[in-house]
Image: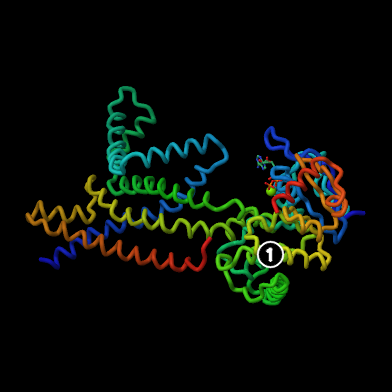
C-alpha cells in the first residue's frame, strides 16, 4: 500500500476552479517532483495537503488513515486539524523564519510547544536541543546556531527552514519552490541539502522550476496544467518521452529559458 | 520666589502626570480591544468601530473634552425641565454637572484609545501572513502563534509610533486647562492673574521638556533592546 494516496482533489476559490481533480500516490522514501507553469495550482495542492486550505472534494489517505474526505461534511475541529498537519511538513518559497529567534530557537520552538516542555524539564530540553543541533548540522549550519535570520543569506535561511520542518519528523516533507526566491548561486546549496535528505529515506514532494533537479533527484514527476495532472511518470518518461502536447510545449519553453 | 513657583508648578505638574498616567493605563488596553473590533470579520462591528475611530480622530480633542464636560449638564437641565417626568428623565436630571477630572479622563481615554487602536491595527496587519502559516504548519495553536510568534514582532513594530503618540499625550494634557482642571499650565496662568507675572508660564515648558526627555530616553532604550534582529 502506498504511503500517501491523493484522490480526485478539487478546490475552487470563489468561481475559479483551481484544482480540477488531482490524484496520485506516493511510496515511502520516494521523491515526487511537481512541475507546471505559473497558476496551474501547484501551491494550492501543497496547501491542501498541509490543511492551510480545505479541499472541496476528494480524499487524502496517509498510511491507511483517512486525513481528509470530501464526502464527510463535518468540519474537523482546530485541534484535530493541527494533529493531521503534523503528518506533513512544508517549506515555503519565502522561508518564513521567525525573525526574533536565532537558528537554534527557530528549530526547537515548535517541538517545545508541541510537547509542552516546561523550563524545568532540563532532560527533555537537552534532548530536543541535541536533536535540533543534529538537524542543523545536517543542513550544514552548525556554525550559525546563534545567528538570527537577518544575519543569514537566503540559501542559509532556507536551510534553517528545512531543519525546522524536519524537527517535527513529518511523514512527508513538502517544498514549494524552495529555491525560487534565491539568487542563482545559492540554489545549489539548498538543492544539495534536499538531495541529501533523499538518501536518508525521507519522503518528499517538491514543487520546482528546476528541471535538472526534477530529472536527477525525483523518483516520480507530475506535470500539472490548469488544475489537472496532465502527465505523470518517472523522470525518464516525462522528460525523455513526453506524451502530452502541453508537456512538450512546457518543457520546450523551460529549455529555452536556460 | 523662584523656589515657590517651582514647587507650586510641580504640584500642577502632578495633576498633569496623573492625567498622563491614567490615560495610558486605560487607553492602552482599551485601544487593543478597539483594534480587534476594527479588524473583526463581522462586517457591522468592523464598520461601526471604524466609524467611531474616524469620528474621534477626525475631531479636535478640545471639542470632545467640551462636549463630555458640558453635555451631561445640558442634558440634565433639559431633563429637569421636562413636563411629565419619568424614571429615565428623573435619573438624567439627577446627574447634574459632570466632575471636571472625570470628564478629562473620559475624553482622553477615548481619544487616545482610538489613536492607539490604529497603531495596534497597523502593527498586527503588518505581520506577513507567512508568519502565521509557518506557525500553523509547525502544529502550533492559534494562541501559541499569537504569543510566541507574532506578539514580539508587533511590539517591535509599534514602539516607534507609540512613543510618538505618548509624547504627544504629555503635551495634550494641557488641554485639560480649558475646563479648569488645575494642571501645570492652569497653575502658571494663575500667577498672571494674581501676581501679574508671566515667566512661570514660560517656565512650565521646562517641566514638559524634562519629562518628554525622560520618555524619549526610555523609548530609545526599549528600541535598542529590540534591535537585535530585523524582520
Ligand atoms: N486564496 C486564493 N484566492 C483566490 N484565488 C487564489 C487563491 N490562491 C490561489 N488562487 C488562484 O489559484 C490559481 C493557482 O494558484 P497557485 O498558487 O496554486 O499556482 P502555482 O501553480 O503555485 O503557480 P506559481 O508557479 O506561480 O507559484 C491562481 O490563478 C491563483 O490566482
Ligand atoms: Mg506557487
Q: Which residue is drawn at 45% across and 56% down?
A: B158
Q: Which residue is drawn at 19% across and 52% down?
A: B186
Residue A52 in view here: yes
* Residue A81 horizontal side relative to residue A94, left or right: right
Q: Residue at x 65, y 56 (%)?
A: B134
Indicate the secondary structure of the residue bearing disc 1.
helix
The one of B94 and B186 positioned closer to us in this rendering: B186
The one of A202 and A64 positioned closer to us in this rendering: A202
* Residue A14 horizontal side relative to residue B175, left or right: right
Q: In this view, does B171 lie above or below A169?
A: above
Q: Is residue B59 above or below residue A145?
A: above
Q: Residue furthest top?
A: B83
The quarter holding residue A41 reads: top right
The one of A65 and A76 positioned closer to us in this rendering: A65
- Crowd around label 1: few <14 · some 14–19 · many ≥20 (10 Å): many
The one of A99 and B145 positioned closer to us in this rendering: A99
Q: In this view, does B216 lie above or below A129?
A: above
The chain holding disc 1 is A
Q: Is residue A198 above or below residue A74?
A: below
Q: Residue furthest front?
A: A256
Q: Where is residue B191 in the image (x, y as percent from the top left)?
A: 12, 56
The quarter holding residue A102 reads: bottom right
Q: Where is residue B12 in the image (x, y as percent from the top left)?
A: 22, 58
Q: Position of residue A93 (x, y in %)?
A: 66, 55
The residue identified by callout 1 is A164
Q: Position of residue A113 (x, y in %)?
A: 67, 63
Q: Residue furthest left?
A: B196
Which colour style is shown?
Answer: rainbow
Q: Residue furthest right?
A: A1
Quadrant of the snapshot with the N terminus of chain B: bottom left
Amino acid at each position: 500500500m502506498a504511503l500517501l494516496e491523493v484522490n480526485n482533489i478539487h478546490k475552487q476559490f470563489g468561481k475559479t476552479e483551481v484544482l480540477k481533480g488531482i490524484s496520485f500516490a506516493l511510496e515511502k522514501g520516494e521523491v515526487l517532483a511537481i512541475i507546471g507553469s505559473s497558476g496551474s495550482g501547484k501551491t494550492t495542492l501543497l496547501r491542501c495537503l498541509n490543511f492551510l486550505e480545505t479541499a472541496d472534494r476528494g480524499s487524502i489517505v496517509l498510511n491507511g488513515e483517512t486525513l481528509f474526505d470530501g464526502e464527510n461534511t463535518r468540519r474537523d475541529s482546530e485541534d484535530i486539524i493541527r494533529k493531521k498537519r503534523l503528518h506533513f511538513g512544508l517549506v515555503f518559497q519565502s522561508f518564513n523564519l521567525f525573525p526574533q529567534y536565532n537558528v537554534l530557537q527557530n528549530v526547537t520552538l515548535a517541538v517545545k510547544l508541541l510537547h509542552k516542555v516546561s523550563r524545568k524539564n532540563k532532560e527533555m530540553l537537552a534532548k530536543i536541543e541535541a536533536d535540533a543541533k543534529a538537524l542543523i548540522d545536517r543542513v550544514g549550519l552548525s556554525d550559525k546556531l546563534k545567528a538570527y535570520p537577518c544575519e543569514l543569506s537566503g540559501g542559509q535561511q532556507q536551510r534553517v527552514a528545512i531543519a525546522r520542518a524536519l524537527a517535527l519528523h513529518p511523514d512527508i516533507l513538502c517544498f514549494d519552490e524552495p529555491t525560487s526566491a534565491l539568487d542563482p548561486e545559492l540554489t545549489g546549496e539548498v538543492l544539495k541539502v534536499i538531495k541529501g535528505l533523499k538518501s536518508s529515506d525521507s519522503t518528499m514532494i517538491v514543487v520546482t522550476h528546476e528541471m535538472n533537479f526534477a530529472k536527477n533527484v525525483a523518483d516520480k514527476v507530475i506535470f500539472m496544467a490548469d488544475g489537472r495532472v496532465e502527465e505523470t511518470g518517472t523522470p525518464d518518461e516525462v522528460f525523455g518521452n513526453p506524451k502530452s502536447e502541453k508537456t512538450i510545449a512546457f518543457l520546450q519553453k523551460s529549455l529555452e529559458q536556460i | 520666589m523662584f523656589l515657590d513657583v517651582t514647587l507650586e508648578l510641580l504640584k500642577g505638574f502632578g495633576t498633569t502626570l496623573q492625567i498622563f498616567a491614567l490615560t495610558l493605563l486605560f487607553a492602552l488596553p482599551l485601544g487593543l480591544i478597539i483594534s480587534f473590533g476594527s479588524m473583526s470579520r463581522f462586517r457591522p462591528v468592523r464598520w461601526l468601530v471604524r466609524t467611531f475611530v474616524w469620528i474621534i480622530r477626525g475631531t479636535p480633542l478640545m471639542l470632545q473634552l467640551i462636549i463630555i464636560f458640558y453635555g451631561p449638564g445640558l442634558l440634565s437641565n433639559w431633563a429637569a425641565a421636562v413636563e411629565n417626568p419619568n424614571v429615565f428623565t428623573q435619573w438624567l436630571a439627577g446627574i447634574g454637572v459632570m466632575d471636571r477630572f472625570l470628564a478629562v479622563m473620559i475624553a482622553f481615554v477615548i481619544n487616545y484609545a482610538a489613536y492607539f487602536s490604529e497603531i495596534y491595527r497597523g502593527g498586527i496587519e503588518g505581520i506577513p501572513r507567512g508568519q502565521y502559516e509557518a506557525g500553523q504548519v509547525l502544529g502550533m495553536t492559534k494562541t501559541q502563534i499569537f504569543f510566541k510568534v507574532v506578539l514580539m514582532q508587533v511590539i517591535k513594530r509599534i514602539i516607534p509610533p507609540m512613543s510618538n503618540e505618548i509624547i504627544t499625550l504629555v503635551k495634550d494634557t494641557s488641554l485639560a486647562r480649558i475646563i479648569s482642571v488645575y494642571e501645570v499650565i492652569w497653575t502658571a496662568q494663575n500667577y498672571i492673574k494674581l501676581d501679574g507675572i508671566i515667566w512661570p508660564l514660560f517656565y512650565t515648558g521646562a517641566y514638559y521638556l524634562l519629562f518628554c526627555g525622560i520618555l524619549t530616553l526610555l523609548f530609545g532604550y526599549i528600541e535598542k533592546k529590540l534591535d537585535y534582529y530585523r524582520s
